[in-house]
């Protein structure tokens, strides 16, 4: 039917066929001759990523500071797989890095010393020091049982005891005459000497003595004199006790000297052997410190060894070597793929070990390496999103890369922040860091800090797709074959491979490209295998692939089905036959992120005499985005250029997306809006069986848009549910013809003459198809 008083213009009979695209241009077909009878399983490498691979090789080969690598691209393109493959190929030719170990620092126990040794030497040093500990546990208890040692020790003890007794007797002798007594007080397992005043010949505690004086039972003059005498005696007792401690120290020193003399031969030989085996200055320095400490603490060490104390406790533990990174047996340099970076996991930690109920201590043996240290001298691969999602990890990461030094500290597990405790010596790092992320992450990091560009000088961009050359196509199919075999899927037929390739082209969004997101290819193959097995087939064929693609989409079609239901029930008013003045079927894409689909949208125009120009209804309602508003302004420019060259354009018009209550953006409806305006101005009705999409410039050229396949298929479904008439179709920009990968159903309908796709380069051509 025609709109208000409009009449249908005579359609140019040659126009539809002139702009109609043949079925062969609606979908790229994979040539079966390009598919071997059984595509061999391809290696796990990458094709179509020559620029990225060249950048990767540069970054991997250059060992200068700052030549870390940021690998950019969307997930599923094989970024991480390719990086790991390349570094694992390169690693065997790299030099083996050195071992890292920590030992006790006898001069500053809170700062464990770092030892850097040739690969495998750290474990040898640990073994040698363990043997030294075993020697001490063997010879020290034996020396304590030696008869001569007992004789000389007992003599020293007797002399010391006699001297202590003499001191106390000399101090105690005049006390009674002065009115005081020296008592030995026991409490809480500790004995101490105290001076007590005598009252009526009996010693009383000083506090009780003061109470008696306060009660008047002791004359004031006698109390004051006694108080002064008590202070004097306490000072003398302190000197006696100080001398007693000196006697004890001298005794221990003499006993130690006797014990040293007993074991000196064995110890000297052991340390001489160690010095002969170890020429490194750092190791010799540590051995000298160990020897001095053993001799200084020979008596407590002997008691510890004789008491059978756990080898993990006591002073002997201090002599052990804690190997943090052991490169024994490593061929080349290490490759680490860190998938869960935390402060402790990436940078290391100083843990605490229990030594009693509720008591924990940290020493050089509780230091733990992180993955950065594990990768020292080699490569570490991380996700940029994982690293920078945690502010603490990101802060430490930036500092380590900037200074190329690692400081391992205790980490509070609840907060991920450094806690108090040991401060081991810093470690100089030489590690190639490879971050994997998308372009947004790179841009954010680049803009956030100039240091990022200085530490990541190489950027390798992975393309989401590649050219459909014969070489790339064959490689694509080889990788698809490898994925199928790895998944344990049924063999894939030639038609199955062709369907996979065609789906890969559709995923890329253009006929001349094929997707490089092999993770998506694998998903399709796994589901196609499911449908093939369900049918009892012996191989995966083309129909199985198509069914897998359709079923995967169907799981996300809830919103699409709801909108289609509204159209079917005529709640959303869409006409697909007849003609209307000022009304055009535009096409919209609903992109949900995980799924996109197209549906027609009614665009109407209303015109009248005036000077207001075009009124943007969506903008007035604050429902439009900036790009849509720009598109409306471009339409106004086209109208002026076309109709207002000789006289002013006296026009007030409005354009509107009918039944649209959400935001609208984009300029792909520009051609449809022009058609609605021209129809309204001329009174010529628009064919409702034809939908249109396309962007417009001010000179009337139709520009490409996105989502062309989804838009065509969306209108096709609406028409198909009502019955195809043979006159229905979609007008698209000619520049989008190379993007077409329409579903087989649409292609078949077009081949049968029941539906059409027209491609135009100018708005006048679109108007010819829409208005006749």
Image: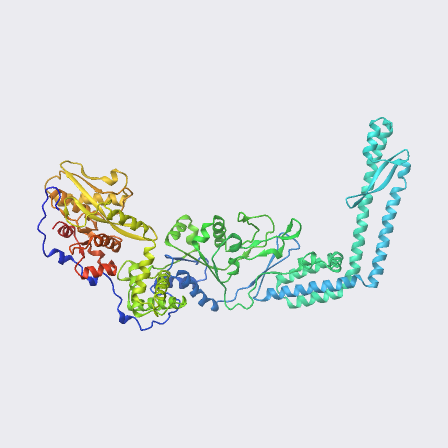
Kindly tell me whether residue 504 is visible in this rendering: no
Kindly tell me whether residue 160 is visible in this rendering: yes
**Is 318 located above or below residue 608 in the figure?**
below
Does residue 570 appear to the left or right of 686 in the view shown?
right
Which quarter of the picture shows residue 492? bottom left
Instruction: Identify which residue, 609 or 69, lies in the foreground.
Output: 609
Does residue 561 appear to the left or right of 585 in the view shown?
right
**Is 479 located above or below residue 592 in the figure?**
below
Tell me residue 271's x, y (percent).
69, 65
Does residue 639 appear to the left or right of 118 in the view shown?
left
Instruction: Identify which residue, 621 or 455, lies in the foreground.
Output: 621
Q: Which colour style is shown?
A: rainbow
Tell me residue 95's x, y (percent).
50, 67
Tell me residue 72's x, y (percent).
38, 57
| Residue farthest to the bottom, as pictured | 37
Tell me residue 62's x, y (percent).
43, 62
Which quarter of the picture shows residue 104? bottom right
């Amino acid at each position: 039917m025609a709109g208000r008083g409009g009449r249908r213009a005579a359609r140019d009979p040659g126009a539809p066929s002139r702009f109609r695209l043949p079925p062969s241009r609606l979908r790229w077909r994979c040539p079966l001759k390009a598919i071997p009878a059984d595509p061999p399983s391809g290696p796990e490498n990458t094709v179509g990523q020559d620029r990225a691979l060249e950048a990767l090789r540069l970054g991997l080969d250059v060992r200068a500071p700052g030549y870390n690598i940021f690998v950019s691209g969307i997930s599923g393109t094989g970024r991480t797989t390719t990086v790991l493959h390349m570094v694992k190929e390169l690693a065997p030719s790299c030099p083996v890095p050195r071992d890292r170990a920590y030992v006790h620092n006898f001069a500053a126990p809170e700062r464990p010393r770092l030892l850097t040794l040739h690969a495998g030497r750290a474990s040898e040093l640990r073994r040698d020091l363990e043997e030294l500990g075993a020697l001490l546990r063997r010879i020290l208890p034996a020396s304590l049982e030696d008869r001569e040692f007992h004789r000389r020790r007992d003599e020293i003890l007797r002399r010391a005891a006699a001297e202590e007794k003499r001191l106390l007797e000399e101090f105690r002798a005049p006390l009674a005459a002065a009115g005081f007594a020296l008592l030995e007080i026991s409490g809480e397992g500790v004995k101490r000497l105290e001076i007590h005043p005598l009252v009526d010949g009996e010693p009383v505690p000083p506090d009780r003595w003061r109470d008696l004086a306060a009660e008047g039972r002791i004359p004031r003059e006698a109390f004051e004199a006694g108080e002064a005498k008590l202070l004097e005696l306490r000072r003398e007792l302190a000197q006696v006790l100080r001398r007693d401690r000196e006697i004890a120290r001298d005794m221990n020193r003499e006993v130690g000297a006797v014990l040293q003399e007993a074991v000196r031969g064995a110890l000297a030989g052991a340390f001489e052997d160690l010095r002969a085996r170890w020429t490194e200055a750092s190791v010799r320095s540590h051995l000298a410190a160990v020897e001095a400490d053993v001799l200084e603490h020979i008596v407590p060490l002997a008691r510890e060894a004789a008491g059978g104390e756990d080898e993990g406790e006591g002073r002997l533990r201090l002599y052990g070597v804690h190997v943090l990174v052991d490169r024994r047996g490593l061929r080349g340099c290490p490759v680490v793929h860190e998938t869960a970076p935390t402060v402790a996991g990436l940078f290391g930690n100083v843990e605490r070990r229990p030594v009693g109920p509720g008591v924990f201590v940290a020493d050089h043996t509780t230091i733990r390496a992180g993955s950065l240290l594990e990768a020292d001298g080699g490569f570490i691969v991380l996700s940029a999103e994982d690293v920078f999602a945690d502010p603490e990890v990101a802060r430490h990461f930036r500092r380590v890369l900037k200074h190329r030094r690692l400081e391992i500290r205790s980490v509070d597990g609840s907060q991920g922040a450094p806690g108090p405790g040991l401060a081991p010596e810093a470690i100089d790092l030489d590690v190639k860091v490879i971050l994997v992320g998308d372009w947004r992450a790179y841009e954010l990091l680049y803009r956030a800090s100039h240091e990022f560009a200085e530490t990541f000088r190489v950027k390798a961009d992975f393309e989401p797709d590649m050219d459909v050359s014969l070489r790339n196509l064959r490689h694509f199919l080889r990788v698809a074959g490898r994925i199928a075999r790895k998944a344990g899927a049924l063999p894939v037929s030639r038609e199955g491979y062709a369907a996979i390739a065609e789906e890969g082209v559709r995923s890329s969004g253009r006929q001349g490209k094929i997707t490089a997101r092999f993770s998506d290819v694998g998903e399709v193959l796994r589901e196609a295998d499911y449908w093939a097995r369900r049918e009892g087939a012996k191989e995966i064929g083309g129909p199985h692939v198509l069914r897998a693609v359709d079923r995967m989409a169907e799981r996300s079609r809830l919103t699409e089905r709801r909108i289609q239901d509204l159209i079917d029930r005529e709640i959303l008013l869409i006409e697909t036959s007849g003609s209307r003045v000022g009304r055009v079927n535009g096409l919209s894409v609903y992109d949900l992120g995980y799924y996109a689909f197209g549906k027609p949208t009614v665009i109407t125009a209303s015109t009248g005499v005036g000077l207001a120009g075009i009124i943007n209804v969506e903008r007035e309602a604050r429902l439009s985005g900036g790009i849509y508003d720009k598109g409306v302004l471009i339409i106004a420019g086209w109208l002026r250029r076309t109709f207002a060259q000789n006289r002013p354009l006296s026009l007030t018009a409005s354009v509107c997306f009918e039944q649209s209550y959400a935001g609208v953006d984009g300029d792909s409806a520009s051609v449809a809006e022009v058609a609605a305006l021209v129809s309204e101005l001329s009174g010529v009705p628009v064919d409702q069986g034809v939908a249109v999409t396309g962007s417009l410039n001010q000179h009337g050229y139709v520009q490409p848009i996105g989502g062309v396949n989804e838009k065509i298929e969306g209108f096709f479904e609406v028409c198909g549910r009502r019955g195809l008439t043979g006159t229905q179709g979609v007008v698209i920009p000619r520049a989008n013809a190379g993007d077409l990968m329409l579903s087989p159903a649409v292609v078949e309908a077009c081949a049968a003459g029941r539906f059409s796709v027209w491609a135009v380069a100018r708005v006048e051509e679109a108007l010819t198809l829409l208005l006749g």
